Image (cartoon, helix red, strand yellow):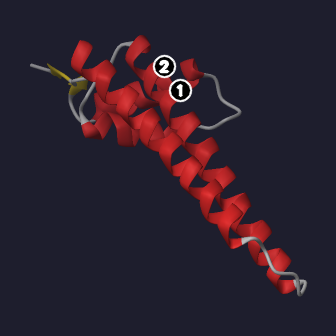
Amino acid sequence: MRSAISPNDPRLVQLVAHFDRADHSAAETWRQVSLAVERIGLTRPSYQHVRRLVRIERRLQELRAQQRDVWKDAAARNAAGLVPSVVWTLNRVRELQLAEELVLQEHKALEAGE
């Protein structure tokens, strides 16, 4: 007998993060995640849950890429002999961290509402 995987199961979140690619559709990610879940003996998650996790994962990746860009810019300015604005750099990084926390909080709110 197969059991269903909860949409809030950390394994599902990890599988979405592993299989999702920006150039793939959410449907393709769902297919890959579904096959992996079936291999471990669980039933497929719903498309809606995987799509929601894909949107969250992509937003988190986008914010993390922006954060890396801020650090790269500061390092490049420093390497060029310029003095990067420490205050601006730290404020921008903090803004991006807060945005990431907001995405995670929204995800938790959606979990609680289901």
Total marks placed: 2
Q: Is residue 35 left or right of residue 6?
A: right
> What is the crowding at mark 2: few (fewer than 14 residues within 10 Å), some, or many (at least 20)?
some
Answer with the quarter of the image where residue 26 lies.
top right
Front in this rendered view, residue 25 or 111: 111
Front in this rendered view, residue 91 or 15: 91
Looking at the rendered structure, the secondary structure element under dot 1 is helix
Who's the residue at 62% across and 38% down the image? 21
Residue to which mark 1 is pinned: 55
Front in this rendered view, residue 76 or 42: 76
Q: CA distance from mark 2 to mark 1?
A: 6 Å
* Tag 2–tag 1 contact (CB < 8 Å): yes
Asked whether residue 114 is in view, the answer is no
Who's the residue at 65% across and 55% down the image? 92
Residue to which mark 2 is pinned: 51
Who's the residue at 81% across and 80% down the image? 83
Looking at the rendered structure, the secondary structure element under dot 2 is helix
Asked whether residue 34 is in view, the answer is yes
